[in-house]
Amino acid sequence: MSREIRIYNTLTRQKKIFKPIVKNYVGMYVCGPTVYGDPHLGHARPGITFDVVFRYLQHSDYKVRYVRNITDAGHLENDADEGEDKIAKKARLEQLEPMEIVQFYTLSYHKAMAELNCLAPSIEPRATGHIIEQIEMVKQILENGFAYEINGSVYLDVNKYNEKYPYGILSGRNLEDALEGTRALDGQSEKKSGVDFAIWKKANPEHIMRWPSPWGKGFPGWHMECSAMSEKYLGKIFDIHGGGMDLVFPHHEAEIAQSNACNNCNPVNYWMHNNMITVDGKKMGKSLGNFINLEEFFTGSHAKLERAYTPMTIRFFILQAHYRSTVDFSNEALQAAEKGFNKLMTAMETLQKLSASESSTYNVNELEDKCYAAMDDDFNTPILIAHLFDGVRIINSAKDGKESLSSTDLEKLKNIFNAFVTDILGFISAKENSGHNLSNEIMELVLKLRANAKTNKDFDSADLIRDELNKLNIQVKDSRDGSSWELKK
Ligand code: ZN
């Protein structure tokens, strides 16, 4: 393929033509969720952003190994690597095993990603499944002299590291800046310097998630899992590393330091970061009352929401902005996105029914070139969507007989819409997407018809409905408040 994709690299702060290490193969690692809470908007944006990158690279004939981790060893409660493990804390409060918390929220994360029509990654490794690899890496960093052990914990010696490798190349922070940010938090720390970070932590007696190591019982530092798992599945140097902008410092900066300290090489050729999401112009936060999880969007059950929004509306809304721009959620903006999405999907249906003319009044090839040019320019989805709406205008005019398309051009236009709308942007029609909700709604209707039959003393029909549903393994339960249904176990 002669096309070239240009990617903005957070590390070089430049947009450059993408060249993978091995021709036609791409290794991509994206930081996944810490599974201790309901999936929310902060999960939706990187999920959708890198889903489109994954889809577009595949569409461009690359074989992509997309690795997205599950953080199940938990982050500690603050950036200074102090406090309780977040998953262990939730487990303690709910009197569950940490792995029950992990399983529950991993499943709800998968469900939300599927509803947003994000493709599953090629590999989804868990931090707890890679403790040995992390310990090996810590051992090597110690051996290379870039870390020190103290009281059963191992810290990366950032000052020592900085003598050989520049620390802070990704975030643009120098050592003084980084120190500034940590000084207040580390009053009586055992670390040599406030900038040092834990690559292995000794487990306090109450810390339940712990593993044996050469330094005693403990657990890996948060940043270590991504270094160990990306190396295991993609190699010491790989093509693309993605994540939210909030991970640039300290997480990704630490990953670079760990790889250099262990393997003497920079791990990643292209660092990609999606920007953040705000709600009504404010940062999302539990204390601000604007923290809306995805299920609440899909059902409309949050005080800030005027009503429910479908997963596709959320997806469309997020892709209407470039991934490096901020996105602000509001009811007005979501309702506008919903209108836009419906208009696009209606045009997709109209397109299938259009009949061809002798000749064309519209240049379909030019539209295709523009669509590719937009995506080749650092995955510019808002520009792509604008071009597709040009196509929508033509489709609607052709329906009214104001424009005409030859049979070749009509076929081509269908291919363009299938490729860009369905395969690359990952939009599916509401009918396909709402399988679960739709069956709920249909069941409500069936039960209403049965209740009506009973009111009209048409007991034969009421019984017929109950018996036929029973054959489908659906049990109808009658009570004084009406009927309900459930699937038989
Ligand atoms: Zn990570």
Image (spheres, helix red, strand yellow):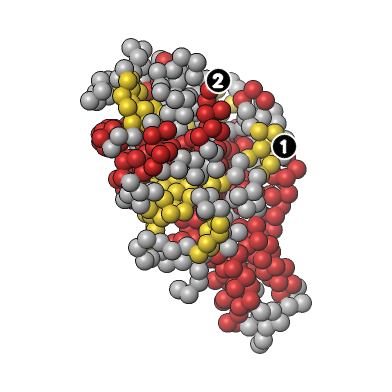
The percent position of residue 74, horizontal first and vertical second, equals 41, 27
Residue designated by label 2: 184
The percent position of residue 339, horizontal first and vertical second, equals 71, 52
The percent position of residue 60, horizontal first and vertical second, equals 46, 66
In depth, the one of 433 and 102 nearer the eye is 102
Whether residue 406 sits left or right of residue 254 in the image: it is right
Q: Secondary structure at mark 1?
A: loop
Residue extending farthest bottom: 358
What residue lies at 45% left-to-right and 43% top-to-bottom? 166
What residue lies at 43% left-to-right and 63% top-to-bottom? 19
Name which of mark 2 and mark 1 comes first in the sequence.
2
Q: Amino acid at mark 2?
A: Ala
Residue extending farthest front: 163
Residue designated by label 1: 281
101, above or below 234, in the image: above
Quarter of the N terminus within the rendering: bottom left
88, above or below 359, in the image: above
The percent position of residue 205, horizontal first and vertical second, equals 33, 12
Q: Amino acid at mark 1?
A: Gly
> Alpha-carbon distance for marks 2 and 1?
29 Å
In depth, the one of 162 and 245 nearer the eye is 162
Crowd class of label 2 (few under 14; some 14 to 19; many from 20; radius 10 Å): few
